[in-house]
Image (tube, helix red, strand yellow):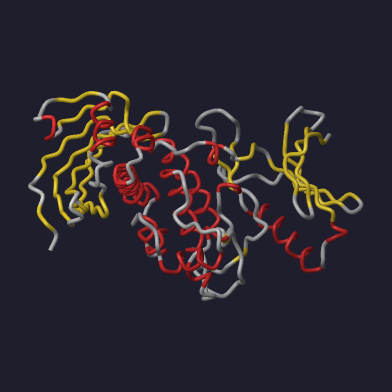
Amino acid sequence: HTATMVDLGAFSVVRRCMKISTGQEYAAKIINTKKLSARDHQKLEREARICRLLKHPNIGKLFDVLTLNVNFFRVTGGELFEDIVAREYYSEADASHCIQQILEAVLHCHQMGVVHRDLKPENLLLASKLKGAAVKLADFGLAIEVQGDQQAWFGFAGTPGYLSPEVLRKEPYGKPVDMWACGVILYILLVGYPPFWDEDQHRLYQQIKAGAYDVRFLKQIYSISYISYVTISFAQFFTVFFFSLCGSARKQEIIKVTELLIEAINNGDFEAYTKICDPGLTSFEPEALGNLVEGTDFHRFYFENSLSKGHKPIHTILLNPHVHLIGEDAACIAYIRLTQYMDVSNMPRTMQSEETRVWHRRDGKWQNIHFHRSGSPTVPTK
């Protein structure tokens, strides 16, 4: 018995269905084969063959294939993995639980001689809507079968933001392209946005080929020898890479949000500044004679007076930022802030200060909760 439509494609529709004799629910992919070419039929048969071959708890199971007149039915269990795009970010514990299952599924595929080629959040399913539900890898429509560690040009296939550099360069490729995509997925889980993004596809591909990403762990995952990956235990692989990746991603977050805050100051945008700061922000300011200042009233005075009287910064550099993580939801950053501005006489001036900011993450957003700095004399810019 088929019921609610879950997804709609160019040649197929996915419906929720139920086996009447047991009441068990499944997802049925119904394909109108009238619209398919001979080549498409071959791809469909290959997909079904691969799905029958793969038997793993983290891979969507193919329960049955039925040909009724002109329809091909592919039935799998599970819910769409919408949770990835619904959250702003994943905690390290949740990301660990998720990516471990994805990598286990990919390892099984590779051991069976299958390269998925289209790993992305949209092709991941959850066994249920409960927290911590099992992750299932699905949609093997672009999957190919390879012999061992075979590298060859199997054609251009995949989703733009998840394609590896060698695919974009149209070079021979193999199983490592799936590991590249796993790195992209892990980045999204931890940071909340993709490592490569541009509305212009050509510029997006240039980013990927140039390796223009902020966090080093994608390079670590991608450059790892595949031989060492399959010969060491998964636990070792996961331990070596994952926990070094998490800290690196969060440190980049802290640097980025600090830069956004400094940008708000430079622009004299008090509204943007207060959105990044906690209402109870505490600070030690040289201008306040070292007294502890609480709240944003003192900062409002600075925005309304100093910035409005010709002291607006024209250029700011954060030198040597050092981030110390304090658990999952707190961090401290120390840096040297070098600011150039024009004074009331229209003379360029330079000011250097050592600053420290404490950040706390609430409801998925980082907020500055404490700030202190030591100023140095302002000097003319030569």
- Up-down relation of residue 153 to residue 307 (above or below): below
Which residue is found at the position 36% from the left and 52% from the top? 237
**Residue 305 is at least partly visible in this image:** yes
| Farthest-out residue, front | 345
Q: Quadrant of residue 269?
A: top left
- Against 48, residue 300 (above or below) is above
Q: Is residue 138 left or right of residue 358?
A: right
Image coordinates for residue 256, horizontal then vertical, percent: 33, 47
Q: Nearer the viewer, residue 88 or 219?
A: 88
Left or right of residue 264, residue 97 in this image: right
Compare residues 269 and 259 and report the one nearer the observer. 269
Is 39 situated above or below 4? below
Q: Is residue 239 visible?
A: no
Residue at figure coordinates x 26%, y 55% from the top left = 315
Q: Position of residue 122 (x, y in %)?
A: 60, 47
Q: Residue at point 50% right, 66% down? A: 203
| Nearer to the camera, 323 or 97 | 323
Instruction: Judge by depth and name the residue closer to the eye, 318 or 218.
Output: 318
Quadrant of image for the N terminus: top right
Up-down relation of residue 345 to residue 153 (above or below): above
Taking 312 as reference, is 151 left or right? Answer: right
Q: Quadrant of the C terminus?
A: bottom left
Image x and y of residue 245, in percent: 34, 49
- At 92% across and 52% down in the image, what residue appears? 69
Which residue is situated farthest in the right direction here? 69
User: How many tags in the picture?
Assistant: 0
In percent of width and height, residue 368 lies at 29, 33
